[in-house]
Amino acid sequence: MRASLFTNEVHHAVNAISFLRQSMLQDLGNHTCAAIAECIGAPPLFLTRTLHNLAKNGIIIAKKGAGGGFRVTQELLDTKTVLDVVTLLSLEKGIPLGGTAGGRLNLTVYDAINITLEDFLL
């Protein structure tokens, strides 16, 4: 097992965003937190808080009511970075981010997902 610099919350958030991106590309609409949690292997109650936090801060979109759930748009994927996700979730917990935030953290979520998929497939 690899050591990680990021919390489980960050991992689940990035996995959820990746799942929502795939859903957007296939035009599958909104997804409930329970459906996302099942697909990415995250605890549903834990993920609910994380997804609502991401939505409140404009990283994903939440819709209430019938047909509601979570989704992303290409515009959000092109403008939000992995650093935005890490910063939001880390600072909220009082975890300071030290050093320079270089490398993949400054990529848009869209580019980071594509590079990760390329790394995995190669």
Image (cartoon, rainbow, N blue to C red):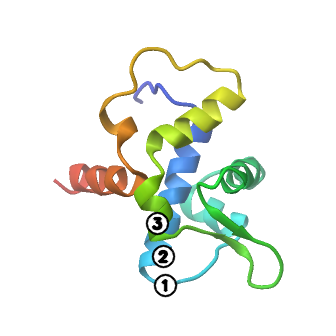
Instruction: Say which amino acid is labelled 2.
Output: Met
Between disc 1 and disc 3, the foreground one is 3
Question: Dots 2 and 1: beta carbons under 8 Å?
Answer: yes
How far, Cα to Cα, is label 1 from label 3?
15 Å
Question: Dots 1 and 3: beta carbons under 8 Å?
Answer: no
Q: Could you tell whether 43 is left or right of 73 in the image?
A: right
Sooner in the amino-acid sequence: mark 1 or mark 3: 1
| Secondary structure of residue under mark 3 | helix
Residue at the image position 65 percent from the left and 65 percent from the top:
61
Furthest-right residue in this view: 65
Please state the horizontal and vertical placement of residue 1, each as a whole percent of the image. 42, 30
- Residue bearing the label numbered 1: 27
**Labelled disc at residue 24:** 2
| Secondary structure of residue under mark 2 | helix
Residue 83 higher or lower than 102, as above or below: below
| Secondary structure of residue under mark 1 | loop
Categorize mark 2 by other alpha carbons within 10 Å: few (<14), some (14-19), many (20+): some
**Labelled disc at residue 109:** none
- Residue bearing the label numbered 3: 75
Residue 53 higher or lower than 98, as above or below: below
Q: Quadrant of residue 72?
A: bottom right
Q: Nearer the viewer, residue 91 or 6?
A: 91
